[in-house]
Image (tube, rainbow, N blue to C red):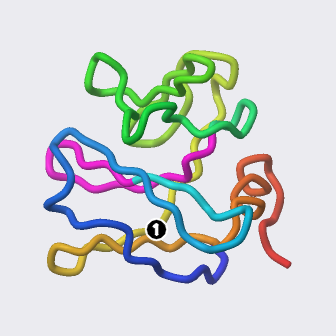
Amino acid sequence: MTAWQEWPVCLQSQLADPGARSFEVGEGTWPFRGFVLQQRGEIRAFANICPHLSHPLDMLPDEFFAQDGESLRCMSHGALFDSQSGLCTLGPCAGEALLRLEHRVDGDQIWVCAPETLQEGIALVRGGSGTS
């Protein structure tokens, strides 16, 4: 994986279980967007980029889970993703996956490794190297 910067994105105590929270890192016109989720006490982090057309999954703030409380959904196209792996199980990008992000929890703080720019995240979702 590339040597991305580590960013503090939210507190674990801010996450419901199950629940998700979006974050934005970097500056300029293309900040990187991602989200962290907590489900059955486990924390995971993904880029907030649908592999179909690179739209964010949440049209409403922090609304990532489908009605079943298990799957993640892209509100733009209705795609459903496995919340463990990020694999799309239904929709126009079936078989593709969300970009999973490395993370760690230090006390209550969740840290995520992510690029400074959404452009790099989109390149990785579309199969680019993401490195310069």
Q: Quadrant of the C terminus?
A: bottom right
Picture quadrant where residue 36 is located: bottom left
Name which residue lies at 49% across and 40% down: 86
Name which residue lies at 54% across and 69% down: 25
Q: Is residue 112 left or right of residue 30?
A: left
Picture quadrant where residue 117 is located: bottom right
Helix, strand or loop status at disc 1: loop
Q: Give the mark count.
A: 1
The one of 56 and 66 positioned closer to us in this rendering: 56
Q: Position of residue 119 (x, y in %)?
A: 77, 60
Picture quadrant where residue 60 is located: top left
Residue situated furthest front in the rendering? 29
Which residue bears the numbered disc 1?
102
From this view, report whether residue 15 is shown above or below residue 83.
Answer: below
Q: Quadrant of the N terminus?
A: bottom right
Q: Position of residue 2 (x, y in %)?
A: 66, 77
Name which residue lies at 65% across and 64% down: 31
The one of 36 and 102 positioned closer to us in this rendering: 36
Q: Is 39 colored magenta in this rendering? A: yes
Q: Position of residue 6 (x, y in %)?
A: 48, 81
Q: Which residues are magenta?
A: 36-49
Query: Which is the main secondary structure of the residues drawn in magenta?
Result: strand
Q: Is residue 43 left or right of residue 89?
A: left
Q: Position of residue 84 (x, y in %)?
A: 37, 41
From this view, report whether residue 106 is shown above or below residue 31.
Answer: below
Task: Give the residue type at disc 1.
Answer: Glu
From this view, report whether residue 120 is shown above or below residue 37.
Answer: below
Dot 1, crowdedness within 10 Å: few (<14), some or many (≥20)?
some
Q: Is 105 colored magenta in this rendering? A: no
Name which residue lies at 45% across and 42% down: 85
Q: Is residue 125 left or right of residue 65?
A: right
